[in-house]
Amino acid sequence: MAFDARVDNSGGRDMNIQIVTGNSNRPLADAISTELGQPLTRSTVRRFADMEIFVEIHENVRGQDVYIMQSTSFPANDNLMEMLILADALKRSSAKRITAVMPYFGYARQDRRPGPRTPISAKLVANMIERAGVDRVMTLDLHAGQIQGFFDIPTDNLYAAPTFARDIQERFESDKLVIASPDVGGVVRARALAKRVNAPIAICDKRRERAGESEVMNVIGDVKGKRCILIDDIVDSGGTLVNAANALLEAGAIEVYAYITHGVLSGGAVSKITNSKLKQLVITDSIQPTEAVKATKNIRVLSIAPLMAEGIARTAREESVSSLFY
């Protein structure tokens, strides 16, 4: 399925929207704007000398359906505050509906209490977004699906799987493929992609000794002589991914690729991926790729602008978004 989110003024329900962006991922906002055929609303998002954030909207948004483009990636707190202040500015400017489009939802890994006296930060962030005046949230591949329930406003969680599936089908023969999950928790995601590309699945059984470190124990499934594709929502330090790739190769896989939605790639992750046995890591541009990522030969970036633009177009026209999931 090819996404076509461009405005059609020849008939049907035309869109009447405004798109505002923060500084977290301007290239993605520009790409989505182009897909929609809707220029970005002129605005200023800058810092005072003490790093306070100042926002000013330079166009009339009264009575408008406004979409804020902002991933809350690194620096997460700055980007989150930009989005909250943008929402407040739009609310006070009498925007009719404000939708926060967050391709990457930061703090999503803090969706429960792992121990005593710890926060549920994802719920706190959800509360802040609502209180800022946001009427609707659109995001991509939430780390934990239950975060949708943290909001008391409509929340659409889109999936990168259709984008990944098309790319995989264009590049690989399905009879030699195995879709692999780097841990037991990702089995549902791996099974969904495997169904799309008509391939079997494998699971890497992982034991995590401490936060930020992981150890792969064994591989469940037949990967001998197969080309394996690891699928996950987030790659951060890269340790889990590299360990899983090594385990699959030791189990007889001929090559290992990885398709990951959000390329956080913190610390020395890029170097770790570069020096690993991964044939290629494919990420989306939900987080703006750094220069180091762009320069790495075994990391490739797929754009999710068509997918996000289609979601925005359907929301604006009050059409179903759920068909994008299948």
Image: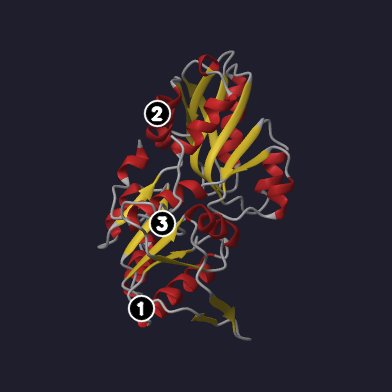
| Residue annotated with mark 1 | 62
Among numbered discs 2 and 1, the one appearing first in the sequence: 1
- Tell me the residue that label 3 is attached to: 110
The Cα atoms of the two marked residues, 1 and 3, are separated by 36 Å
Q: Residue at x 32, y 40 (%)?
A: 323
Seen from the viewer's position, the closer of residues 68 and 37 is: 37
> How many C-alpha atoms fall within 10 Å of the one at disc 1: few (<14), some, or many (≥20)?
some
Mark closer to the observer (2, 1)? 1
Q: Earlier in the sequence, mark 1 or mark 3?
A: 1
Tell me whether the residue at label 2 lies in contact with that at label 3, contact meaning CB atoms closer than 8 angstroms.
no
Q: Amino acid at mark 2?
A: Arg
Q: Which mark is residue 94?
A: none
Q: CA distance from mark 2 to mark 3?
A: 25 Å
Residue 316 occupies which quadrant of the picture? Answer: bottom left
State whether residue 247 appears in this view. Answer: yes
For residue 154, side relative to residue 180 (left or right): left
Percent position (x, y) of residue 37? 50, 57
Q: Is residue 115 above or below residue 54?
A: above
Task: Give the crowd class for mark 2: few <14, some 14-19, many >=20 residues within 10 Å.
Answer: some
| Residue type, numbered disc 1 | Arg
Foreground pick, 272 / 135:
135
Q: Residue 191, labelled with which disc?
A: 2
Query: Where is residue 303 drawn, in percent x and y?
Result: 56, 46
Q: Amino acid at mark 3?
A: Gln
Q: CA distance from mark 2 to mark 1?
A: 45 Å
